[in-house]
Each structure stands twice: as structure tokens, then as C-alpha cells.
Amino acid sequence: MRNACSNAVGFLCVVALLQLSVDARATPDWEESAGSTPSFARDIRPILSNNCFDCHGPDEDVREADLRLDQPGQAFRDLGGYAAVVPGRPMESELYLRISDPDDPMPPVESGKKLTVEDIERIREWIAAGALWEEHWAHKTPLRPAVPELADTSWPRNAIDHFVLQHLQQEGLEPEPEAGKEALIRRLSLDLTGLPPTLAEIDTFLNDESTDAYERLVDRLLGSPRYGEHMARAWLDAARYGDTHGFHLDNERLIWPYRDWVIAALNDNLPFDRFTIEQLAGDLLPDPTLEQLVATGFIRLNPTTAEGGFIEEEYLAKYAAERVGTMGTVWLGTTMVCAQCHDHKYDPISQREFYELFAFFNNTAEAASDGNQPSPEPTVKVPSSEQLAMRAAFADQVAQILARLEEPFPEIDARQSEWEAHWRARSASRWTVLKPRAFATRDGTQLTYLEDGSILAGSENPARDMYEVIAHTGLPRITALRLEALPHPTFPHGAAGRAANGNFVLTQFELEAASGARPSAFQRIPLVAADADHSQTDWPIANALDGDPQTGWATLPKLDRRTAVFATLDPVGDEEGSLLRIRLGFDSVHTGHSIGRFRLWVSSDPELRPARFGSWFSLGPFPTEENGELAFDQDYGIEGAQIDVTAGSGEEQSWVERPEWGDGTIHSLEGEICATYLYRTIDAPQEREVILALGSDDALKVWCNGELLLSERVARGASRDQNRVTLQLQAGENELLIKVVNFGGEYAFVTEVVDEDLAGLPQEIARILDPNHSPSSDDRLELRRTFRRLHSSEYREVQDELNTTRARADALEEEIPTTLVAKEQDEVRPAHVLIRGSYAHKGEEVSPDTPAFLPRLSREGEGRMSRMDLALWLVDGDHPLTARVTVNRLWQELFGVGLVKTAEDFGSRGEFPIHSELLDHLALEFSERGWDTKRLLRQIVASATYRQDSKTSDAKRVHDPENRLLARGPRFRLDAERIRDSILAVSGLLVNKVGGPSVRPYQPDGIWEAVGYSSSNTARYTRQTGDALYRRSLYSFWKRTAPQASMQIFDAPSREACIVSRARTNTPLQALALLNDTQCIEAARAFAITLLEEDVADDRERLIRGFRRATARYPSTSELAVLSKLLETEREEFAANEEGATHLTRVGDSTLSSDSEVAELAAWTIVCNLLFNLDEFVNKE
């Protein structure tokens, strides 16, 4: 193979050397002929900014000699008989005297800065000419300049050309003629869609002799869905879009719907002012649409962390400051972050003003930690049109099934009264009311015994209290107690609780017992299970047994009679009965939340005892060499099998008993990337439901009696109550099996029972059937549903249909992607000036506002300003920066460099625009004509300036090596995405699907592993197959700490920060990638197959078609000769090296096949690979 590629490599080396010689940099002549009178804004301010502002600029903390040179009032003021600048008198100006003093120069030697002789002379000339002080050009609202009048108007096509040609004539230059149609269609296609034209498109344009052929081509390209995909690339750089969080573990972040929103907005030509408003404040619009909420993902794109030990306040400050910096770069072209720790050293931005901007972003409702989760709140679901239709269909099906469930079931309904009578009788015999012998309270509540056996609380309602009741029961072997919370008209809302809202919080329920023979020897009786007819969200009945006063049982919004049952571990008492002491604690942080009226019951029914959970057994770990996803899917002979804990698994592993593993505690497991099985038996005295809460690190599956109840494929750290399952226990022994899978790092699990139907019926039904209860109409409806569910197979079938439909609907909801969005907090988070930028050192509090050097923010109404006010200010017609900065970046995309080269910095240290009047003209055209991006692009590409040939003379290149004067057409190296996408497009492999989740194409092994934490879900790169390998580069998964190698080699940024101008390099590594990367070789093979299958006369025609596909033009005779010779050489090489030919033609996953001999295909693959490596292919001309 090395020999086979030698000729191609030699050819490429010649091309590369030629390119290096053409692109040799030189100092442009025009920079040294700026004119006789220096301009302060263009010539003097940059000198002062770069050399003097460090000590004599805006930052008062480091200012020397109380001298400012960034403001005219300070530079011209009397300093005690002298001034830094005396207009018209350089020899009396201290500034000039100090910088020209050879013995004591300024800047001082130790500063490391030195003015050139030319710099000193320019300052002298400026002072001598009157020291006219001009406001910084970018901070002045643009005024529409007059379009220059030209003596010869034959060349200009629109106003752009008038400005350019006037400047060229001043420099003594002439523009180049218009490029050929082949060059123009390739240039336009690459600029507007990011893809080269097809042969059919080229020939159609070449054959179109109409006068508007060019304009119709532009319109077609601007209307292509490929346009939005291409233009989104630059915006996503600026927006710092990535598919991971960026810091620490750099876990996956689900925010790709924002990327798709950008593509759609660009294709729809959303006006740039709306494009701005929806991204910065879409959530603050009246009744925002889903798309407008998705747009606010821009704000959430900053890197975030979940690193252990991080300080919440510090990172919230980091996030807000980063957003200020990004906003400043994207819309203002200003280095805002330079004012984060002190006043800006070069631009008129104080530190206070930085934090006033900071205040706009400091109120975003988000946690400082992303939790290493893919969708940290706030988020929204983003269904596709198909998913919306399916969601509606499921809702309709559910409604129809619910209607069927309420239809009459005559045969079964007739037996309901008998069933109710049975349970009422059973309830009456099961429970015995306790008559207290004594009662007391800890904090002063007065208790009164009522005739119905209840106890009423009266007098004052203390903040907290403890009730104690002592009662005797003659029942032997007590298995459960029942607490009734009873309403009373003397309490708020006539409820059972004494709080103002009628609620209560029971934080503690304890039982002690003494034998009837020894009534003074009380012993604590463990209560191990609890069940209630209703619990308030996050306040379950189990909380009354956890010993934590911060939790408790509450029942809001249900304020009527409520019941709770508490079961003992073992029966209590003997034949002589027992003396019971019961304590009810109300020590909640919510004061005054005690029960106002209650009644206590006891039962000795053995069926009320809780289910008994046996010891845990574990089997594993079962390691996998690749990733935890495989372990999750693989059955290691346990799932669905009869489990015998005395036997091994068949893989030399045995079950190990874990009696030390208690419930409610996180238990660590052994293993790195593996699966472990956990097993235990559950003995139930009768059929009942048990709700089990689980937590795991990472994924888990749960079976009960062989039925799969939960399959949770997730990467996370273990904590309590991450999932819940309902166990349908049968009377007697039941089996619980859990599989926990580790994707890397920590490995653990936790389980606990949170609810159990102790009565054999749901506690709510038991309450309704209590003889002391008068059922309501809703109660009777609930009774009918429960009876049918328990006794009608037909009803259960419909119920199962409902459950299945709901499960499918739930599965659909799980499939609907989420995306991060912005949202304001209800309670304003104060913003302060942070001294030296430290979160720990707060200065004065500040409110949202904008910098004083820019137009004031005008707004309607009063109150605190919001992100909406900021967004509207940015796109205000008088704003001097937004339109200029945006137009400049669009120009940069087409010409390789902006009218202002420093696209990220329009401040004092940024470059003065070469064509300042043209920039202002385009900025006003943009803002005053609806912020119409496509119109602006159409205007630029229609200009004669854009349509020039990029070929030029050596003299012009020396005069203007970077083509800043625009005396020739644009020519520069394509960005990473356009190179890869062009290769895929020309080869025929490109999959033109718009949008969707990010994909993982080819990438060299080990790149993610080198930077990944083992516990990260992006620790290992698993490439996809099929179409995912051939999608546009825009859709490649972007891991911030390790971006796609094929992108980074060609200067793509990491997107850890905002980038508005990529570097552009030409390196040997890039050439090696184009020669050897799997994607390139596979594409070359696909390209070769396409050429071999074309119906052409001979190799010459085939080579011509291949060359035209790659470059859009016909090859010259000499170029065709080189290609023909290479083809013959490679044929000979591969004819003698069949193994090498076979290896070459099997690179990649694509299944394209050819009828040609393998040596022939290999030879053409080398030729096609060479075409991908042509300088003309990787450059735009």
C-alpha cells in the first residue's frame, strides 16, 4: 500500500508547496499609505490602546499619575501648568515629549512595550494638526453614507461595488474580471449551502444563457434546506453549542432541538431581531410557543458542572458571567469579560456595568449542578409532528376505554352489595376502638375524650406538641393499630388538622406496651409498616415512622376523615391483654400543624401483619469488556429462570447471602463495567400490593414472581426513591429479582418499602367500607371500580387494555426528546459587584442595566428590567453595534475575513474597518430593511466585488496579501465541516436528513478514553452504523473535552467558549487525515464505484467526470495526463498486490459493491482520494 500511494503523495506535495508559496504573507503596501492627516479613531487610538491604556486608561485601580488618555477632557486638561495634549503644539504636549524622550521613554522599558518611530511620528502629526478627538467609530450610531459617484459605472452591479471601487481607485488598483461560471457556481454553492454543486447542477447553470441565470441560482441555493444547515455552523460556534456539559465528567447534554431550531430559523429567514429576541428572551414573550422556548436554549449552552465539592454560589456566578461574555461577543463585538474583575483597561466599560449586565442573567431558574444528567431543569419536551399525532391518538383511545369502563356490567355489579356487606362486617370485627385511661400533652394542648371514642384537642394551638395516650385492651396478640384523623367544626375549614389550611403533619407515631400482669414495664414495640387512605405529595405515611421531624404524614388537599394503619413486626400481648402507650408527635417545621381530633383502634387479625422480606442474596458481578449497555441487555442465565440460591449460575459464580444489607440504606457493589443480580423472598399473609422504592448506580431491572416490572436504562448516582414499582404479592412466598448494571465508576443500590396494603384492600377502600363511614357519591364510584377490578375478568381485560394504552402513551412520552430552556426565578436572585470577580467578596448590589457608552435602554413600564429589555435594546435601530457586528460576521463567512478583521472585538484594541462606509451602509441596509439575512446575503453575492475571479497578479498579492481591499474574488481554505461534507457529497454517501439527535461517525480509537472519567457516560466512544456515518458534520456529536478529531484537525473549536472567527491553518496532519482517514478512504471507494458504473466511453471521460465532480471545472491537458499516469501506475501496483487492493476496498461500513476487479476498484479509489486532496478541492476559489 505504501508503494501504491507514492505517486499520489508526490503529486500532493507539489500542490502543497505551490499553495504555500502563493499564500506567503507580506506587509500590505496600503497600510502604510493611510493619508497625510492621521485620524484619531483609525490611527491614534489603536496606538494608545495597545501601549498606554494599561496605566492611563479606564481602569482606575491601576491608573498612574492620575492621567487618562482615553477621554478628551482628561487628555487635554491642565495638569498644573502643562497638559498631556496641547492641540496644535506637539512640543508643548507632555504625551509627545515623553514618548519621544530617548533617556526616559514611555511606555517604560519594564512594560515590555515600545512605540515604533512611525507610531511616534503619527502622534506628533495628529497633535500638530489640531488633535481632533473622535469618538470610537464603533460606539457611534451609524449614519447612512452617500453611495460614491464614479466616473466609470461599467463595473459596479450594486452599491457595494461603488464603495469598493472608490477605495481601489484611491489605491491605484483595478478589480479582477468576473470569475467563470464554473467557479461561480462552486463558490456560491459552498458559501450558501456548504456543499459543492452536482454535475447536473453545474451543467444546468452552464447551459442557462438567460440574463437572470445567476440570480435564479442564488435564489435556489438560499431556498435549499441545506442553506440553514450550513449557516447554522457559524452560529453554533458563537452560541458555544455542544452535546456535553463541558466540565468534569463532561456527560451528555440533550439540547440538540436547539440546534434544529437554529437550522429552521435560518431556513425560514427569521428576521435577525426576532432571532435575537427569541434566543435571549423567548420565554418572556406573551404566551410563548414551544419553538420560542426551545430558542432560549442559547442561554443554557454554557459549560456546567456537577463535580463533587463545587460551591453553588461560585458556579452560578460563573454561569451568569459567561453569558455576559457570550452576549458581548455575539451582539456587541466587545470583550465584556475584561471588566469582570476590574474596569475594562481599554474600553469604556466599568466593572459595575459588567455586573449590571450580569444581573440580566443572574435570575435564571437553574441549579448550579447539572447533576451529570442529560436534561437538568428547566426543560421542555419537543415532540415531532408524528409524535404529536400519536399523543393525540393515545389520548383519544384512553378516553374511549375509560368510557367503556364506566358502562354497566350487569352480572358482576349485582354481586357488589354482598361483597360490601362482607367487608363491612369484617371491618367491624377486625377493629376495636381504644378507650383511653389517661392522656397528656408535652406542650400544653388540652385533650378531651368524646363519647364516640375520639379525643378532641382544644385551647391554644402550640407550635409543636406531643400527644400521649394510655389505654388498655383485652385483645391478645395485637398486630396493628389504626389512627383516624377526624374533622371537627371548630377547626379551620371544619377539617381534622389545626393549621390555618386545615392540614396536619404527623412527624412521629410510637407504640409501647406492657403486659396486663406487669402494667408498669413498658417496652418499645417496633412499627414496621404503615398504610394510609391518602397522603399528600412528598408527605407519605411512612414518614411517621422514620424518626425525622423534618418529614411527616400530611393529607392536603383532602381535609375530611383520614385513616392510617400501623403494623407491628410481631404480635403484641398475651391472653391477659395489654396496656398500650401511644405517642403522636407534631414537631414539624410547619408550626401549629397538629391533629385536632383523632380516634385509635387496635386489631389482632393476623392478616394485618406486614409482608416479611427475607435476606438479600447477590450473584455477580458479570463483567463486560465493552460497555454497560451490553451488560444491561444480556441475560446471564438468571432472568426468567427458576432461582435456587444454593446453586451457582453455571459460570462459576454462586449466590452469596447478604444479611447485613438493610432497607433504606445505599449498599455498594463490586465491579466496574458489569451486571449484578439481587434476590430475596417475600412472605405475605394475604394477597396485597406493596410499593417498593429503589435507587441505583447505574441502570436496573426489576422482576416480581417472574414478571418484569421495571427496565430503567440510565446512567446516574444512587439515591433513595429514584424509581417506584408496585409488587402484586400473592399469599405465601413471592420472589423479587433485581439486576443492577454499572456503566463505570461507583456501583450501588438501595430499596425500601414506602406503602403496603395491610388490610388486603387499598386503605382508601377499607376506609369507605368502615361501618362508621357514610360513603359519598365519589366513594360509591370508587367502590364499584374496585369491586369490578377484583371480581370481573371482563373488566380487568378492559383495564389491562387501558394500562397497555397508557403504557404505550408513557413510552411515547419517554421517546419525546427534551431540551434545556431558560426560565426566570420567581424570587429575584440579587446581583452584586464581585470584588476582583470573586463570588465570595460581594460589593454593592446592582440592578440590570446597560453600559453608559452605548444608547440608554428605553423601556415601557416600571420595575426590574429583564432579558426581554436587554434583547429589545440590542436590536434597537439606534444601537451602534449589533447590526455592524452581525453584518461583519456574514461578510467574513463569504470573504474569509470581515470588513473588521477582529470580529470578536470592535473596541479600542480591535481593527479599524478597511471599508468603514461600506460597513455602515450594509449595517443600515440590514437593520432598516427588516433584519433580513437572506436579502443581505443576496445583495453581497450579487455584487461584482463577490463575483471577481480569485486569480490575480503577484504584485496585487504583495500589495494586499489578505485581500482586504477586495481587488479580487475570495479564496481561502474551507472549514472542517465543508471539507468533510464535500467529500461525502461528491462520493454520493452523504445522507441529507435534516435534524434529529446527534450522531457518532468514524473516529480514531481512544480519543474519548484519554480524557474521560470512568463514571462518565461519554467515557467511551461507540460509533454508530448506517446512515449516522454519513450525515452532515453539523450533526456529529460534539463532546467539548474531545471534539470530533476530523473536525478539530481542521481548526474546529471545542465550543467550550464563544468563537466568532475560526483559525485557518494548513498543516501536514490535515493532509495525512485526507489521505488516510477511514471516512476519506471509504468515500474515495464510493466515488470510484460511482465513476466505474457510469456509462462513458473510456478512462479519459471517466477521469474528466471525476475531476468535474470534485472541482466543478474541466481538467487541463496536463492535469488529465497526471491523473491518467497515476491510474495506470496504481493498476499495475494493485495487480501485483491483491491483498493490498482487497484491504483498501474494504475500508468503512458502506456496502456499495462494484462489478469491477478488486485491483481496478483499488486503483480508482487512489485516484478519487487524490481528487479529495487537491488544493482546489479543500479551498474555495
Image (cartoon, rainbow, N blue to C red):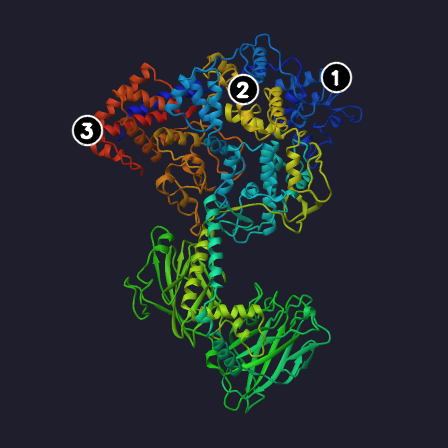
- The C terminus: image quadrant: top left
| Amino acid beneath label 3 | Ala
| Amino acid beneath label 1 | Arg
Q: Residue at x 61, y 65 (%)?
A: 556
Question: Which mark is nearer the camera, 1 or 2?
Answer: 2
Q: Which of marks 1 and 2 is nearer the N terminus?
A: 1
| Amino acid beneath label 2 | Arg
- The N terminus: image quadrant: top left
Q: Which of marks 3 and 2 is nearer the N terminus?
A: 2
Q: Mark 2 points at which residue?
A: 964
Residue 281: image quadrant is: top right
Q: For residue 193, say whether it is visible.
A: yes
Residue 90 is situated, as x and y percent measured from the top left of the image, at 72, 17
* Real-space Cα separation, disc 3 to disc 2, in angstroms: 53 Å
Q: Which residue lies furthest to the right in this view?
A: 81
Q: Is residue 551 above or below residue 468?
A: above
Q: Residue furthest top?
A: 151
Q: For residue 1003, say whether it is visible.
A: no
Q: Mark 1 points at which residue?
A: 89
Regarding mark 2 in the picture, which secondary structure is present there? loop
Residue 1080 is situated, as x and y percent measured from the top left of the image, at 35, 32
